[in-house]
């Protein structure tokens, strides 16, 4: 019975993962097909997830992430936000660039928290929740190297120009969190000549302090 229970839990978690990572809302038959199980079992799994508000049905009856999962994700990142905000503020003011933390949600790179510099002529907005493919941009490549170091060997830092948005440059370094979630600390700015090595040194020092504070 324990094995059966574990298998049911595993399938339920996999179903939740499929719904949360899908580019478009999934139907229950699609969940059943992707899990390789009978539709009746998929309906039971989804019903349990609905009962606990982990998934909801939209107007078309397809499945989307529910408020309970959103709340858990917000709480899971709370300590990282608290540890990062002061460091991001210091980085933004010292470098005069927008500073942010990005993580990986299983499908794309997602900006978690961002701080823009004050008293500068022009700044780049980086909205929390914005996302882009893991293969594009410096933050994505930093995270990719944490996920697949044997395929994409880690570098001290990553630099990108005109990849996610034309006219913007980003420099990113890894942040190694105690929970194992891959993350990167980065700045983004209108492309111009800056002292990259100095910027990287400041990013690395801030990343180390964030790591210690979030453990």
Image: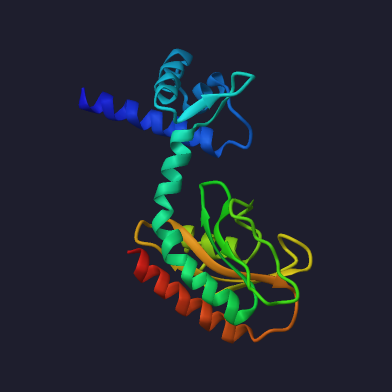
The quadrant the C terminus occupies is bottom left
Task: For residue 64, say whether it is visible.
Answer: yes
**Which colour style is shown?**
rainbow
Residue 204: image x %, image y %? 48, 77
Q: Residue furthest right?
A: 166
Taking the spot 74% from the left edge, 61% from the top edge, the residue there is: 165
Q: Is residue 153 above or below residue 14?
A: below
The quadrant the N terminus occupies is top left
Taking the spot 55% from the left edge, 76% from the top edge, the residue there is: 91
Q: Within the image, what quadrant is residue 61 found in?
A: top right
Taking the spot 44% from the left edge, 13% from the top edge, the residue there is: 40
Residue 200: image x %, image y %? 55, 80
Residue 138: image x %, image y %? 62, 67
Q: Within the image, what quadrant is residue 49 found in?
A: top left
Count of residue discs: 0
Q: Is residue 182 above or below residue 120?
A: above
Question: In the depicted view, which residue is nearer to us: 98 or 32?
Answer: 98
Q: Residue furthest top?
A: 40
Q: Residue furthest front?
A: 119
Question: In the depicted view, which residue is nearer to us: 150 or 55?
Answer: 55
Taking the spot 63% from the left edge, 56% from the top edge, the residue there is: 127
Task: For residue 154, say whether it is visible.
Answer: no
Residue 194: image x %, image y %? 68, 84
């Amino acid at each position: 019975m324990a094995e059966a229970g574990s298998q049911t839990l595993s399938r339920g978690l996999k179903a939740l993962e499929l719904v949360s990572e899908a580019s478009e809302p999934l139907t229950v038959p699609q969940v059943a097909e992707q899990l390789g199980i009978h539709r009746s079992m998929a309906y039971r799994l989804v019903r349990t997830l609905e009962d606990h508000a982990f998934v909801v049905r939209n107007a078309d009856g397809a499945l989307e992430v529910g408020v309970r999962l959103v709340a858990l994700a917000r709480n899971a990142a709370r300590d990282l936000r608290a540890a990062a905000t002061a460091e991001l503020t210091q980085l933004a003011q010292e470098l005069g660039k927008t500073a942010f933390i990005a993580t990986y949600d299983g499908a794309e790179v997602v900006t978690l928290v961002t701080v823009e510099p004050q008293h500068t002529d022009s700044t780049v907005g980086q909205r929390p929740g914005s996302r882009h493919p893991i293969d594009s941009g410096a933050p994505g490549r930093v995270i990719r190297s944490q996920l697949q170091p044997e395929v994409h060997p880690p570098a001290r830092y990553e630099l990108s120009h005109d990849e996610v948005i034309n006219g913007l440059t980003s420099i990113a370094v890894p942040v190694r969190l105690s929970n194992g979630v891959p993350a990167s600390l980065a700045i983004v700015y209108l492309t111009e000549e800056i002292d990259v090595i100095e910027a990287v040194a400041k990013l690395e020092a801030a990343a180390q302090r964030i790591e210690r504070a979030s453990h």
